[in-house]
Image (spheres, grey):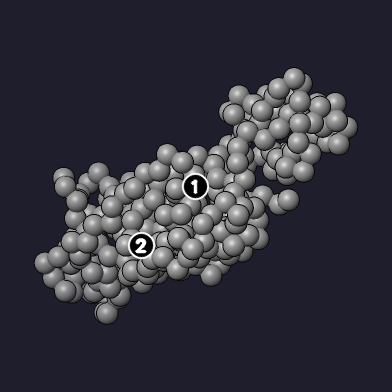
Amino acid sequence: MTIKIYNENRLTGQPFFKDLIEYLAEHDEVLLRQIHKDFADVKNMDRQIDSFIAAGLILRSDKRYSLGFHIFKDSDFDWKRIEDKKAEPQRNIYEQPIFIEENSRIEKLLQESNCYPRLTNQTNQVILNFVTSFSYKEYPENTKVTPTLANYFNKVASNLPLTAFEKEIYQMIGDVDPEYALKYMTTFLLKFMRKDIVKNKSDIFVNVLEKYNYIEKISEKEYKCLLEFSEQVIPDQKYDDAKSFIIAQIQQTTAIEPFISLGDK
């Protein structure tokens, strides 16, 4: 069985972890000596396995090893209840790793679902709201995802592969502190609350906004905003269990245009 991991962390991102869990999915309750035999080339194996056990990802009982989590398959879901359901946009939050059978129907629906990331800052009340694919971190699937500034900051912070477009952005601003960048970007965007056309000198942050098509340059020093100011609020919804999160997330299929909203300050 091939397993897809979402919400990866430092442990689940290790190459040996992926190999080990797919091995244990096929060979339950295995003795350590058998694991050593079948993974003879892995260095520091005992130390790695101990860290997986400490995190509850691998179970050890009577010197035998097995998976400490559930792998979701299509058979885990009542398709009559969830098929073709569409929910209002919300930010579904589940912070633990999720394990899905690869090439399953549920994996396909997750990858096709939407997320609604936002960027806030400490300088003003501007909130930048976006829509992106649940699979925006996945290569090569992410090459088909409409790029957003939120995706860029997240991927740079997580040291994830960048698309060709994001590499161009990286040449412009590199791994700049998002708070620093957003201070200037949002201060500029706030001007459009009072004026349709804003005069401003070109700089790297303005150029990035233009490259993402959030603003349009109409003359040498004049710009118009292509994002609407809206009172729409996309709520957060936290989940304590992975299955409830998955069911809610696959219903997030509503496409929205990116917009600017104002929070409390």
Q: Does residue 38 appear to the left or right of 89 in the view shown?
A: right
Q: Please state which amino acid type lies under the numbered disc 2.
A: Ala
The answer to whether residue 53 is seen in the rendering is yes
Q: Quadrant of residue 260?
A: bottom left
Q: Does residue 122 appear to the left or right of 117 in the view shown?
A: left
Residue at (16% x, 45% y) in the render: 265
Q: Quadrant of residue 234?
A: bottom left
User: Is 48 or 203 nearer to us in this picture?
Assistant: 48
Q: Please state which amino acid type lies under the numbered disc 1.
A: Lys
User: Is 143 or 82 nearer to us in this picture?
Assistant: 82
Residue receiving disc 2? 87
Residue 71: x and y in percent read 62, 45
Residue 245: x and y in percent read 45, 49
The circle drawn on residue 243 is: 1
User: Is 3 or 128 nearer to us in this picture?
Assistant: 3
Q: Secondary structure at mark 1?
A: helix
